[in-house]
Image (tube, grey):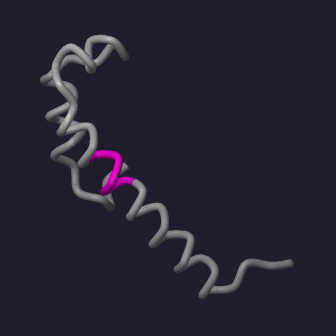
Amino acid sequence: MSSTPLHRLVATLRLYRHRHLTRQRLRELDPHLLADVGITLTEARREGSKRFWEA
C-alpha cells in the first residue's frame, strides 16, 4: 500500500509529538538520573531546548 499525503502528514505529526514529549521529559530528569544514562545536564538542556521539528 502506497503512502498517501494524509498518511505522511499523520506520521509527521506523531513524530513531532513524540519529540516534544520526550524532550519535555528529558528536561525534567534529575542530574543523577541523567548520569545513569550517560547524559550530562548540559547535553540534556541542549536537547531539551530543541524545537519539535528539529532532529
Q: Is residue 4 above or below residue 12?
A: below
Identify whether 5 is placed above or below 12. below
Residue 20 belongs to the span the image colors magenta: yes
The picture quadrant where one finds residue 54 is bottom left
Would residue 53 appear left or right of 7 to someone viewing this image?
Answer: left
Query: Residue sitting at 21 percent across and 42 percent down?
Result: 48
User: Which residue is found at the position 16% from the left and 46% from the top?
Assistant: 49
Q: Main secondary structure of the magenta part?
A: helix
Give the quarter of the image for residue 7: bottom right
Q: Work out which quarter of the rendered image holds the N terminus and state it.
A: bottom right
Q: In the image, is residue 47 part of the stretch drawn in magenta?
A: no
Left or right relative to 53: residue 2: right
Instruction: Locate residue 12, reporting x and y percent.
Output: 49, 69
Q: Position of residue 17 (x, y in %)?
A: 39, 64
13 w.r.t. 23: above or below: below
Give the residue at x 15% y 22%: 41
Front-most of 34 and 9?
34
On the image, the x and y values in percent for residue 15 come to: 47, 61
In the rendering, at what x and y percent does residue 16 appear?
39, 63
Single out the residue that lies furthest toward the right. 1
* Horizontal side of residue 6 vs 27, given as left or right: right
Which region is colored magenta?
A: 19-23
Circle count: 0
Q: Residue at image x 27%, y 43%?
A: 25
